Amino acid sequence: MKIAVIGAGNVGGALGKLWAGKGHEIMFGVPDPKSDKLAALLQSIGGKARAASVAEAAAFGDIAVLATPWPAAEAAIAAAAGRLAGKILVDCTNPLAPDLSGLVIGTDTSAAEAVARWARGAKVVKAFNTIGAANFADPRFGSAAASMFIAGDDAAAKSVVSGLAAELGFDPVDTGPLLAARWLEPLAMLWIHLAFKQGLGPTSHAFRLLRRQV
Ligand SMILES: NC(=O)c1ccc[n+]([C@@H]2O[C@H](COP(=O)([O-])OP(=O)(O)OC[C@H]3O[C@@H](n4cnc5c(N)ncnc54)[C@H](OP(=O)(O)O)[C@@H]3O)[C@@H](O)[C@H]2O)c1
């Protein structure tokens, strides 16, 4: 797949690198594609990824991934200049308060629903927000894979994103319509609280949905 990764930090950099390793074509869309930071990231990926403006990356991707800080999300989507319409847009953001004390919006709406309003015509799928990026390369905890909770209104789009999560070793869990992001973003807050306020750190824990036949 041709994947546009908008934002090349912890989340975007990790996903782009991992999917490039799986044979996908990656183009990062960032405000400064010629920065030293991007050059170092591209070098670490070994020539299997490129960097460009957000608009160029959005035009390139069959699918796009939004991995910017929440305060930058609306501007990043605006910079895509309508080129996300009709495409899958994976929203990884969490609307965090700057001091990680909580979410700045939530439960009666969600970041994902705001993203869907801003990226008119895109098939928005919430994913990759409920576990720290340092686990993307290895989502196995003992013998169990971490769940990757996914929400969205387009079944085919969710199936594609589930496939991309499974390629990284996650157990994809379809949580229903995009509205379910109202519950996934607080779940991310719990993960962050455990990691950084309760002292578990960034790589020791994950959520997994347990199932049984009933
Ligand atoms: N960190 C995690 O473990 C984790 C896990 C799950 C979800 N999340 C969520 O995922 C999102 C990204 O987190 P992160 O930790 O990857 O952030 P980060 O390391 O700060 O990276 C953010 C990236 O977005 C870029 N950016 C900023 N403004 C932009 C714009 N207008 N257009 C395009 N790109 C822009 C930044 O570029 P510059 O460096 O040039 O500013 C940087 O490459 C956040 O919403 C976060 O809550 C984070």
Image (cartoon, grey):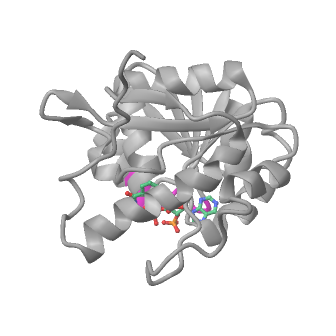
Which residue corresponds to the image point at 62% horizontal and 49% vertical from the top-left?
Answer: 181
Q: Extreme top residue here?
A: 213
Res. 67 visible in picture: no
Number of on-image labels: 0
**Residue 32 counted in the magenta span:** yes
Classify 95 as above or below 110: below
Classify the position of the C terminus by image quarter.
Answer: top left
Classify 87 as above or below 9: above
Q: Tell me the magenta residue range.
A: 31-39
Residue 62 percent across, percent down from the top left: 68, 26
- Which is more toward the observer, 49 or 171? 171
Asked which quadrant contains residue 148, the reply is: top left
Q: Extreme left residue here?
A: 142
Q: Is residue 53 left or right of residue 207?
A: right
Classify 119 as above or below 69: above
- Which is more toward the observer, 114 or 78? 114
Res. 199 visible in picture: yes
Which residue corresponds to the image point at 67% horizontal and 24% vertical from the top-left?
Answer: 157
Q: Is residue 196 left or right of residue 23?
A: left
Residue 156 percent across, percent down from the top left: 69, 18
- Which is more toward the observer, 140 or 85? 140
Residue 70 percent across, percent down from the top left: 60, 66
Which residue corresponds to the image point at 48% horizontal and 50% vertical from the top-left?
Answer: 129
Classify the position of the N terminus by image quarter.
Answer: top right
Asked which quadrant contains residue 108, the reply is: bottom right
**Residue 42 counted in the magenta span:** no
Residue 112 percent across, percent down from the top left: 68, 52
